[in-house]
Amino acid sequence: MTPAEMEARIVRYGDLQPCKTAFIDAHTPGSDQKENFTIIGGGVSESPDQHVHISIPHGFNIGAAGQPPNCRNSLHNHRTAEVFYVLKGRWRFFWGRWGDAGEVVLEEGDIFNIPTNIFRGFENIGTDYGMIMAILGGDDAGGGVIWAPQVIEDAKDHGLILGDNGKLYDTKKGQNLPGGVKPMPVLTEDELAKVDEPSSMQVIGGYVRRYNDLMAISDKKPAKVIGEKGVIRDKPGFEVDFITRASASEEKHAHDKPSVLMPVKGHWRVEWDGGSATLAPGDTMSVPENLTHSAVPSMTGEAAMYHVVATGEAAGATWKP
């Protein structure tokens, strides 16, 4: 791989292209300032305006959400994994039918593997624009988003209608549902009764890990954060490792599937036969399968990075060991 070929597989933080009309709550007050980024894979955007930076299938999707203070993402559900780590700012995650079953506040570097089959939302409670990075299970990310009924109803009051084809139509722009397309039906009471309402203790204890703790346990070798033997035990179709200055190695290695490097702190130098590149926090690098490479900090100071690779297992519901 030449440096130019590899650069095409790097999405720089400063080059991210946002979509402000990605989801059904794009006009709803309190949610209308959020930005959605689709970095690797098609993600779950409902808008044709969404820009996909890298379309190569990886077995999972990488995305991001950027929001100003006090902006929230509405309650929704997923059929496959939705993992977030905080890149910038301070964020409150909440869940439940009405968003009041539990909550957790996360800081920069913290990671949250949100269990499937719960309604979840999040908001930036910091004082500046914040960014969270996302990993979604499966190449098709489970086929889309399942919205809480009140989200669909509120959106209609502000001009947005979601079709049963998973596409958005903006009546403020004169758009209407095409022939043969009906409004996305809201979940029935029987369906809602089957959606989980776990407590904060259940969710935080099982699916949240703090940055400082990950720094501590990755002092000798990279920490397995999400995986069958991870500190968060799950089999979402991918594994997530946490690498620090203390656990990084100059020894080159390869994976039989594409992998992704996502720096959280510090600058990282990635080397391969044919070239090298330096990554900064917020950058996302797709490493081709079977490419021998290494990644180590390129400057002094604190350094940490998340590493994601597919396992080849089907994406689905949260695994219960």
Image (cartoon, rainbow, N blue to C red):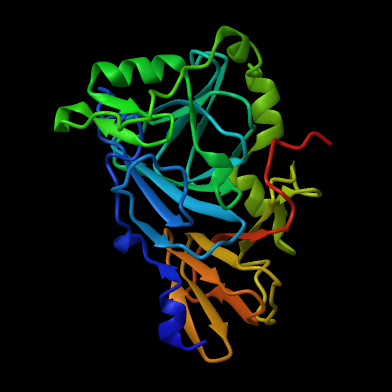
User: Relative to residue 14, is residue 223 drawn left or right?
Assistant: right
Task: State the residue lying farthest toward the left.
Answer: 173
User: Relative to residue 250, is residue 297 drawn left or right?
Assistant: left
Q: Quadrant of the C terminus?
A: top right
> In the figure, 93 relative to 12: above or below?
above
Task: State the residue lying farthest toward the top.
Answer: 189
- Where's residue 181, x and y in %? 38, 29
> In the figure, 51 relative to 236: above or below?
below
Judging depth in this view, the residue of 279 and 185 nearest the camera is: 185
> In the figure, 71 relative to 255: above or below?
above
Task: State the residue lying farthest toward the right.
Answer: 321
| Displayed quadrant of residue 132 | top left
- Where's residue 18, x and y in %? 30, 50
> In the figure, 245 relative to 96: above or below?
below
- Where's residue 173, x and y in %? 15, 33
Would you say residue 196 is visible in this rendering?
yes
User: Relative to residue 306, is residue 234 drawn left or right?
Assistant: right
Judging depth in this view, the residue of 247 and 226 nearest the camera is: 226
Residue at horizontal 63 percent and vertical 31 percent from the top: 116
Residue at horizontal 34 percent and vertical 40 percent from the top: 22
Would you say residue 303 is visible in this rendering?
no
| Displayed quadrant of residue 47 | top left
Residue at horizontal 62 percent and vertical 80 percent from the top: 293
